Image (cartoon, coloured by chain):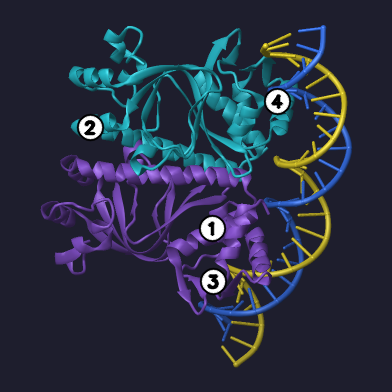
Chain colours: A purple, B cyan, C blue, D yellow
Amino acid sequence: MKSCNVASQNCHLCQSLDKGIFEGLSKKDLDVLDSSKTSNRYKRKQIIFYEENPILGVFFIRSGKVKLYKTSRDGKRQILKIVQAGDSLGHSSLFSNRSHAATAEVIEDADICFLDKNKFLSILHANPSISLKILEKLSKDLNQAEEQILDIAYKSVRVRFVELLLTLKQSFGVYEDGVYKLEISLSREELAEAIGTTEETAVRLISEFKSNDWIEVHKKSISLKKPEELLQLTEFGY
Amino acid sequence: MKSCNVASQNCHLCQSLDKGIFEGLSKKDLDVLDSSKTSNRYKRKQIIFYEENPILGVFFIRSGKVKLYKTSRDGKRQILKIVQAGDSLGHSSLFSNRSHAATAEVIEDADICFLDKNKFLSILHANPSISLKILEKLSKDLNQAEEQILDIAYKSVRVRFVELLLTLKQSFGVYEDGVYKLEISLSREELAEAIGTTEETAVRLISEFKSNDWIEVHKKSISLKKPEELLQLTEFGY
DNA sequence: CGCTATTTTGACCACGTTCAACCGCTGTGG
DNA sequence: CCACAGCGGTTGAACGTGGTCAAAATAGCG
């Protein structure tokens, strides 16, 4: 597993590094980093790490999409986050405990770099500014998680689904032929797991939204036709 | 508002500082810190800060108990955390900046220190090790929040209530006369808000648990009689 | 002691889960 | 080439948890 198998000489220019938590790192440190990490290709449904697995280091997404989820005792899954190019995985649990707090599974074929825990920590010690970057990231993640708690606790599944669609629009939405196409392909089950409900309810909501002309569905792809009206829904109970 | 109105000469020995994120700080830095902060007494139901308020600095609980909650559009509250002596408030939102993510309200009269944002940040810059402490703390908080998402999404209210009781036992439980008395007094409404349900359901659960002889209630205080059996419940669906 | 806030109980009902059957598509082996 | 299995998606019917609303009981407080 050679580090950065393709175009290794300018790998530190890959999005994972200059955009994410390593933004602003010196050329020298980027080189150290570059020579320390390994790169790998993952296919859909591959598991990068399981919940409870020991944390060996940090992962950086170069391309593709990955979902992070937790599994309950009776096998139900809750998707916590969907990450893509530029995001990192494992940096959060690295500071608190020994094991991963969630499972990371590839939803769209991905190139992912890995950086060993110790190398990461030594780079971090040499560059205190990175800590602040991570603090900022963790802090945002925490805010988002707390928001999600409130959502699941008190909002109807319908509203949660609308909010999911709008969030997906933000990250993956492309305006095209008068509609916002969500450039991400999730199964009904995955959609359900993202809002904490069952596949059946997700299906029913989709057909409801189709007949309301909020959205249109082609194959696996969902497009939003009237995001403004969807946004309205979240304002009231519905 | 003189800094550390009581026994100011050894205030840096107060739990908030030597136990929390400032553990291991040098005598000199503790002195700087000590002279920078102000102390205040808050009574039950007083608000320390509201959600959306700008973040002016960090708070350290010296005594008493404080709840952190978010409020939904229709006025329902979700308690995210209950903090006590040694804990700090506001350190999390400080890095993603802008405003507080939750409201902090006193549930038991409290002494609370305040440290200005800029003073805090300058101490932090001078002591990179603090960042790591905070990273660890944030990381744990995030894990906990994510756990809570899973709980609310897929566990019954009954199980969530049991888990709340067991969590409270961990933080506030005192073994006394064969029962574990929870040394914290929460209203039925607050209990409900902690598990994301309504007051009525909380009341019903309490009377159910009383008649099952799991718990006993005197005035505002709840005692657990058979924590082991309660723990059992969480293992299965129930 | 009266008034307000909190707690408790009851009846009702809706949302969302569960379980079951069915459809349509894709890939596979006979 | 078709048959069939398997998977993802869809729909229907029934049920139950937990929320809502209303009203009564109790506790707390000036």
Q: Residue at x 33, y 25 (%)?
A: B115
Q: Are marks 3 and 2 in contact (CB under 8 Å)?
A: no
Total numbered badges shown on the rendered structure: 4
Residue C27 vs residue A19: left or right? right
Indicate the quadrant where residue B22 lies. Answer: top left
Residue that numbered label 3 is attached to: A223
Query: Would you say residue A219 is visible in this rendering?
Result: yes
Please, what is the three-letter code of the amino acid marked with disc 4? Ile
Q: Residues within 10 Å of mark 2 (few under 14, many from 20)?
A: few
Q: Position of residue A200 (x, y in %)?
A: 66, 60
Q: Are marks 3 and 4 in contact (CB under 8 Å)?
A: no
The answer for how far apart the CA atoms under marks 3 and 1 are is 13 Å
Residue that numbered label 1 is attached to: A164
Mark 4 and mark 2 lie on one chain; the one further toward the N terminus is 2
Q: Position of residue D2 (x, y in %)?
A: 65, 88
Q: Residue at x 27, y 54 (%)?
A: A114
Chain under label 4? Answer: B
Q: Quadrant of the C terminus of chain B?
A: top right
Residue that numbered label 4 is attached to: B206
C24 or B200: nearer the viewer: B200
SS label for mark 2: helix
SS label for mark 4: helix
Residue that numbered label 2 is attached to: B122
The answer for how far apart the CA atoms under marks 3 and 4 are is 47 Å
Residue C24 vs residue A64: left or right? right
Residue B70 vs residue A128: left or right? right
Indicate the quadrant where residue B96 lies. Answer: top left
Mark 3 and mark 1 lie on one chain; the one further toward the N terminus is 1
Please, what is the three-letter code of the amino acid marked with disc 1? Leu
The answer for how far apart the CA atoms under marks 1 and 4 are is 35 Å
Chain under label 1? Answer: A
